[in-house]
Amino acid sequence: MATTRKTITLSDQQDAWVKGRIASGDYTNDSEYFRDLIRRDQEQNAKFQSLKAAIQDGLNSGESDRSVPQIMEEVELRLKSNGSL
């Protein structure tokens, strides 16, 4: 895997925080900490983009001709069938 070296500037408080995380054993060095933050941000962004796409799909689908109770019944059946309920 190719790597790129980056230089960042932190406040004293931020630097102390990172050093504290390393001292507590959560991370072995600064780079590991920052890579973990980036991975978490990527995962969160992927979830957000997926949710955003689902919302857009819903908006694009138009109005439903079913009533709210009918929709809720369908959702309940789907949740029961996949073991979520």
Image (cartoon, rainbow, N blue to C red):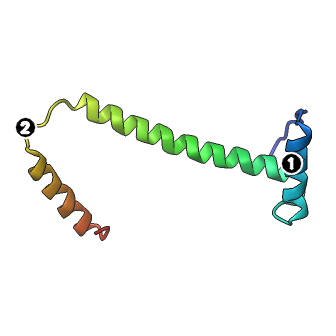
Q: Is 37 drawn above or below residue 61 in the view shown? A: below
Residue 31 is tagged as 1
Quarter location, residue 10: top right
Q: With 17 as the anchor, is 65 left or right in this view?
A: left
- The one nearer the camera, 8 or 60, is 8
Q: Choose top left, top right, bottom left or bottom right for residue 56.
A: top left
Task: State left or right for residue 71 relative to residue 47.
Answer: left
Among the two numbered marks 1 and 2 on one chain, the one whose residue lies closer to the N terminus: 1
Residue in the image at 80% along x and 46% along y: 34
Left-right relation of 22 to 75: right
Q: Amino acid at mark 2?
A: Asp
| SS class, disc 1 | helix
**Circles 1 and 2 in contact, beta carbons < 8 Å:** no
Residue 80: give x, y in percent of width and height.
23, 68
* Residue at 91% from the left image edge and 53% from the top image edge: 19
Give the labeled residue for mark 2. Answer: 65
Image position, residue 62 (x, y; %): 19, 29
State the CA–CA distance, disc 1 to disc 2.
54 Å
58 w.r.t. 71: above or below:
above
**Label 1 amino acid?**
Ser
Q: Residues within 10 Å of mark 2 (few under 14, many from 20)?
A: few
* Residue 66: percent from left, percent from top: 8, 43
For the C terminus, the quadrant is bottom left
